[in-house]
Image: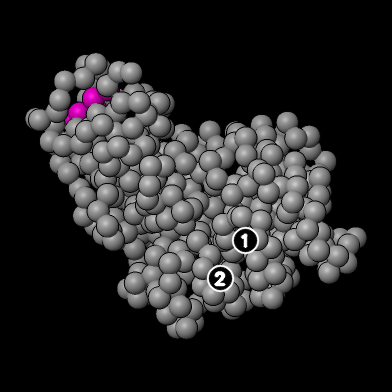
Amino acid sequence: MTAELLTGIGELTTQSAEFSHDDDRLTDAALVIENGRIAWIGPAAEAPPSDSRVDVGGRAVLPGWVDSHTHLVFAGDRAAEFEARMAGQRYEAGGILATMTATRAASEADLVANARRLRREAEAQGTTFLETKTGYGLDLLGELRSARAAAEVADVVSFLGAHVVPPGIDRRDYLDLVTGPMLAAVAPHVDFIDAFCETGAFDVDECREVLLAGRAAGLGLRLHGNQLGFSGGVRLAVELGCASVDHCNHLDDTDIDALAGSNTVATLLPACDLSTREPFPPARRLLDAGAHIALASNCNPGTSYTTSMPFCVATAVLQMGLTVREAVWAATRGAARALGREHGPDAVGSLRVGGRADLQVLDAPAVAHLAYRPGVPLCMATWTEGIRAARPAPPTAR
Ligand code: NIG
């Protein structure tokens, strides 16, 4: 296999140090990619010989985004619901059923094609690793089709049969279905089990039952919690040792202390908060208390119809009080942690010798430009497991 040298890196963000949101910046750097892995990192002047060379002309290089929370398997859109919300209507989970109806009516091939379209859109903005979920099928066949479609498109798949109770089935019967035959059917295709812990969806005891069934089936645990109110989801996630609890808009001091004393990542979804007009989560307080956070797009047709991780990073900096480096960390290594992929041979979200070559080049000299120039498409090229995709124009190769 050939060795490719990336040189002329004005600012290289590796995120490879332990527990640091703001170290790991090298200037005048280079790295070598070989067999999909990073073979060398160091000063450009000391770069080893290589088979090919790309000079990025002083631009910034950082890990590709890890989008740890998306719902890409769906059909239809809910633009009318969005417009009504912008006119003052409150978000409630009821719109999920409109997407369920459209999703059940779509073919599995169409579900895969739509999810692929969204993945490509995400990749064009620097995403190199992505989780997605089921949750719009909400019957055995619908969830199975969704799980298979998700597994075709995403790197990590979560089973969200416990999104809401669909019409036409008793609540208890639906829980038995989710924790029984539905879980057994989807388990070969998924990595995590998830549940929506909220008024209008599932309460704490129901979510505990669902997550424990998933754990017994060998799945990792994650939870949607405290999005629309103080649902108790955060404390349940900490109690069960979930990898992640997602949304976290409404947190009291006990929730923050619980997260800070745990390994559960608080995954924050700023694009969703703008679209639902929920208050942003207390990101600054979480970090200051010592909690782990991640940023994700939550791409879905109801509450967050965007694949743009740069938009989430910029919003976290401009509106949620994070520094640029904290936001970049949360959208890469923090998100990897939320997916259980922070360490080990298949780690993502950081650049280290021997690790996966998942990285992006910005058309900017420094990552600060992600928030300094919000809304500007800065991703110029990505390498995913060492394979390059350039857009719109590649850096000059010499
Ligand atoms: O993460 N909160 C629950 N589920 C999705 C939204 C689903 C929808 O409204 O379609 C979310 O925001």
Q: Image point 42% across, 80% down: which residue?
A: 257
Quarter of the figure that contains the N terminus: top left
Query: Helix or strand or loop: what does disc 2 sit on?
Result: helix
Q: Kindly identify the residue that appears in the image at 40 percent across and 32 percent down.
A: 385
Magenta stretch: dominant secondary structure: strand
User: Does the magenta portion include 5?
Assistant: yes
Q: Give the answer, above or below, for where 170 lies relative to 135.
A: below
Report the disc number at residue 215. Answer: 1
Q: Is residue 168 left or right of residue 310?
A: right
Q: Which residues are magenta?
A: 4-9
Question: Residue, x 60% and y 77% (percent of image)?
Answer: 232
Type of amino acid under label 1: Arg
Name the secondary structure under disc 1.
helix
Which residue does the numbered mark 2 point to in the structure image? 240
The residue under the point 58% across, 74% down is 236
Q: Residue 177, how many percent across, how many down?
A: 81, 59
183, 304: nearer the viewer: 183
